[in-house]
Image (cartoon, rainbow, N blue to C red):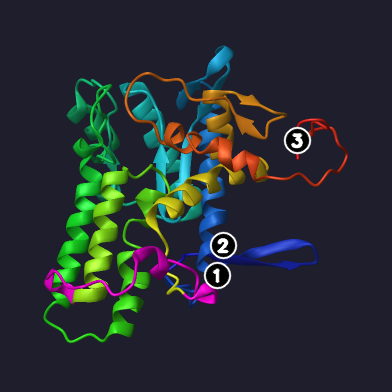
Amino acid sequence: MFGAKFSVMVNGVPAGFFSNSKGLRQGDPLSPYLFVLGMEVLSTLIRRAVDGGFLSGCRLQGRGGVEMSVSHLLFAGDTIIFCEARKEQLTALSWILAWFEASSDLRINLAKSVLIPVGEVEENEELAVELRCRVGSLPTVYLRLPLGAHHKAISIWDGVEEKIRRRLAQWKREYISKGEHITLIKSTLASMPIYLMSLFRMPKIVAKRLEKLQRDFLWGGGSFERKVHLINWEVVCTQKEKGGLGIRKIDPLNKALLGKWIWIFAYEKDNLWKRVIGVKYGQEGFGWRTKKARETFGVGVWKEIMAEANWCWDSIKFKVGKGTRVKLWTDQ
């Protein structure tokens, strides 16, 4: 329930406050708007604390000495607040949360809150006690590989392949028609790696293995038995209008998903993620795109995306407005 209070203006003067008898439960269409209003109060308190030097935020330094500070992130019902691992900053943060509770009449469940240290941090437990929460750890999104490492060392794709095999093993016990095979490939098998494919380039050897699983399931079901493939896979992946079955090939889909970020970066106006990427890597071409990622360590997400920048930009055309951000002789 959202504990709101109301007041009636009588001759321009508030006539006291009274509590509502009915509130909004989770799932109500108005709930997201109330969350935005409440989080705006918290965001204002955090920004004032950063401006006053009580919180440091996360400082990003890019090319040419350009810096940017990110104090907090909000997504749905989750909130991430950045600060230094010092007792003074945790004390200031606890006061901010207390002021937020007093101003919004909401209660923060600190038992569900997590203090996540980044790097080597001493006295984690003492810092967690200051904020009255527990200590957690960063989730492992992907592995950082040494230079020259082979793609087969990437465990994330092995996990995707294992999930597909488990799903096929479940379908093995059921009788499924050929038409249902096609539907399951499009709706399930082809969509399971979509999220990772939108951030990382899939190694060709992995793409071949996943497509082989789709081919074997199409002609042999979930039993993994070798059966004759009646139609070439290239024909199967052709559009229906051209005589195929419309199954999307993995490699072109992977390139399209990565290239979409290049287009979104050019199209979006002033989003936070765009400003962060722009500060870190620098911008060129009147701000339509970033400079190349030249880091020599690990596997970066934007570095993977920028690997598809050339073909994507060759396919982008400009509709000229004022003309101040378009190169007449080089842009399409």
Gap in Å between the C-alphas at discs 3 and 2? Answer: 42 Å
Crowding at dot 3, Cα within 10 Å, few <14 / some 14-19 / many 20+, comes out as few
Tag in front: 3 or 1: 3
Horizontal relation, residue 224 to residue 291: left or right: left
Horizontal relation, residue 185 to residue 198: left or right: left
Considering the image in quadrants, where does the N terminus appear?
A: bottom left
Question: Label 1's element?
Answer: loop
At a point 29% along the width and 83% down the height, the residue shown is 178
In the image, residue 301 above or below residue 298? below
Q: Are marks 3 and 1 in contact (CB under 8 Å)?
A: no
Horizontal relation, residue 260 to residue 236: left or right: right
Residue for badge 1: 30
Q: Amino acid at mark 3?
A: Asp
Q: Amino acid at mark 2?
A: Tyr
Q: Are marks 1 and 2 in contact (CB under 8 Å)?
A: yes
Residue 302 place in picture, x, y as percent? 46, 34
Residue closer to the observer: 146 or 244 = 244
Residue for badge 3: 331
Residue for badge 2: 33
Gap in Å between the C-alphas at discs 3 and 1? Answer: 45 Å
Q: Are marks 3 and 2 in contact (CB under 8 Å)?
A: no
Residue closer to the observer: 31 or 312 = 312
Gap in Å between the C-alphas at discs 1 and 2? Answer: 5 Å
Considering the image in quadrants, where does the C terminus appear?
A: top right
